[in-house]
Amino acid sequence: TISFRSDGIMQIDGKPFFPLGSYRDPSDTRTDFAGLKEAGFNVTHDYYFENTDRTVPEARAYLRAAHANGLRVFLGFGRPSIRRGDTRSWKRWTGELMDEPGLLTWYMMDEPICQGIPQAAFVQLQQAIRQMDSGHPSSLLLARISPVTEFQRSYAKTCDVLWCDPYPIPGKPLSLVLDKAEACREAAVPGQPFWVVLQGFDWRYWKERKTAFEKCGKEITRPTPEETRAMAHLALSTGAHGLIWYWSPNSVYHLQKQAPTVWKGICETMAELNGLEPYLTAPRTPDDDNVRLPAPFRSWSRAVDGTRVLAVVNASDDPAPLSLPARYKALDQRTGKPPAAAPIPAWGSAVYIWQE
């Protein structure tokens, strides 16, 4: 059974769970989970089940394979069935798959406003899900999330978890992650969990592959490891309850083969986040706000059994000195040393830990 604590943290059979997911394995193969396991993801997905209407046995086999590999799934619905309002197929889909332990959340759709799908379609879809399955939440992703109006809020009301997908690289500053994540939090129903989808691709190669490879080189290097780490902690600084990565399918480029530095950065950030899992799932308390830092820094903090973690991002285009209060006997989690005297680089990040 999937539920949520009062602070928005997901629970599986009563145990806290922080989603760290991806839309696909880097192999882009439905039966291969090796890349996801290498990086340490705990949630996955496959557009195969949304491109057209698929069969229950196919989905069941996929859910069981993912679960056998230690992964849970956000499972979508066939887009044709959503466009034609096929309530019967939605009920059959949810009713026959709701007992699969690999299922985490029903993924209603991503970017419906961009695709011209009205809010009423998701009212009907949510009703169908609820009639058949009360044990799994529904999720909906809004790309056009800001500025927040009643239009966005009307979509948020149709789902249990609201998602957004800020993709700033290369043409926009990383502050887009903050802007969209905060808009997602604002659009959400009070108390509704929100998750942020982070960028694992470079727009230039997506839109102009041949030209981009000629101009920028054969190896894709953005998002850099530093950008990946910063985007993750920027999203967490807004209070996000889950992080999901999106990278391009292999029809655009192969993440591991053509962007190995990007993949390395994702793996490094995932290793850090998995190490912070007890803090990511720790109850959120008013004490956490007492270690917020002044601009230009963004931060998030949690304490577990008397040990506190503070993650910091310099959210500006210029280096900035970080001065932590003397009462924080902070050590950099990566180096085991006190904070360096040198300013933190533009959009640089660090994680500190100390005993309270």
Image: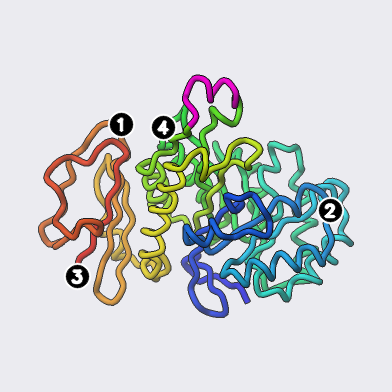
- State how far apart marks 2 and 4 are (Cα): 38 Å
- Residue contact between numbered discs 1 and 4, judged by CB atoms under 8 Å: yes
Q: Nearer the viewer, mark 2 or mark 4?
A: 2
| Disc 3: which residue | 355
Q: Position of residue 266 (x, y in %)?
A: 44, 49
Per the rendered image, the range of residues in magenta is: 209-218
Q: Nearer the viewer, residue 256 or 44?
A: 256
Q: Nearer the viewer, mark 2 or mark 1?
A: 2
Packing grade of label 4 (10 A; few <14, some 14-19, many >=20) is some
Amino acid bearing label 2: Asp
- Residue contact between numbered discs 2 and 1, judged by CB atoms under 8 Å: no
The reply to whether residue 35 is visible in this rendering is: yes
| Disc 1: which residue | 317
Q: Residue at x 30, y 54 (%)?
A: 311
Q: Which residue is farthest bottom?
A: 13
Q: Position of residue 341 (x, y in %)?
A: 11, 45
